[in-house]
Amino acid sequence: MKKNKKEREGIVYSTNDNFDYSYFGNLQAETLPPQQQDLRVMRDNKRKGGKTATVVTGFVGTSDDLKELGKTLKMKCGVGGSAKDGEIIIQGDFRDKVNEILIEMGYKSKKAGG
């Protein structure tokens, strides 16, 4: 397997013959249990061309677990959305409903913003 030089953060050259650079670029944070997650639910108009969206931030874990939680929220709200970069975006203003669903699932969740 060929390693990309760009993944070697900060190492240019080593004079040590036994030096073996270890690649840490593909590590993801382990998903915390729902009781330890501290999620914020807010409304946002700046994305999606000015349309109202509900944004859930503060998720700590793998992208697969984030997408699974996003899928559950979208299904229970009956709308579309996306889950990437540590955020879940739900189309429309569903702050109250999303907050209730997260609390029922065992997450620590608060409404944030205006």
Image (cartoon, helix red, strand yellow):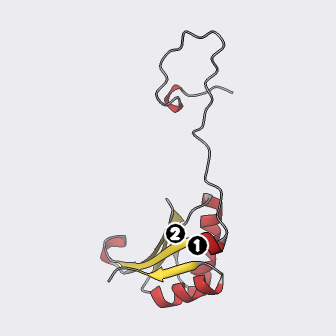
Quadrant of the snapshot with the N terminus: top right
Which SS class for mark 2?
strand
Q: Nearer the viewer, residue 40 or 49?
A: 40
Identify the residue at image location x=61%, y=53%: 29
Residue 98: give x, y in percent of width and height: 53, 84
Identify the residue at image location x=50%, y=15%: 13
Tell me how far mark 2 sits from mark 1, CA to CA: 7 Å
Q: Which quadrant holds residue 44?
A: bottom left
The circle on residue 105 is none
- Looking at the image, residue 17 sits to the left or right of residue 11; the answer is right
Local packing at callout 2 (Cα closer than 10 Å; few below 14, some 14-19, many 20+) is: some
Q: Which of 17 and 50 is in front in this view?
A: 17
Identify the residue at image location x=58%, y=70%: 37
Q: Mark 1 points at which residue?
A: 70
Q: In the image as oriented, which residue stretches furthest toward the front?
A: 36
Residue 26: give x, y in percent of width and height: 61, 42
Which SS class for mark 1?
helix
The amino acid at mark 1 is: Gly
Q: Name the residue under label 2.
A: 82
* Residue 94 showing in the rendered view: no
Q: In this view, does 50 lie above or below 20?
A: below
Residue 48: give x, y in percent of width and height: 37, 71
Identify the residue at image location x=63%, y=29%: 22
- Looking at the image, residue 14 sits to the left or right of residue 72; the answer is left
The amino acid at mark 2 is: Ser
Q: Is residue 72 above or below residue 66?
A: below
- Looking at the image, residue 9 sits to the left or right of residue 72; the answer is left
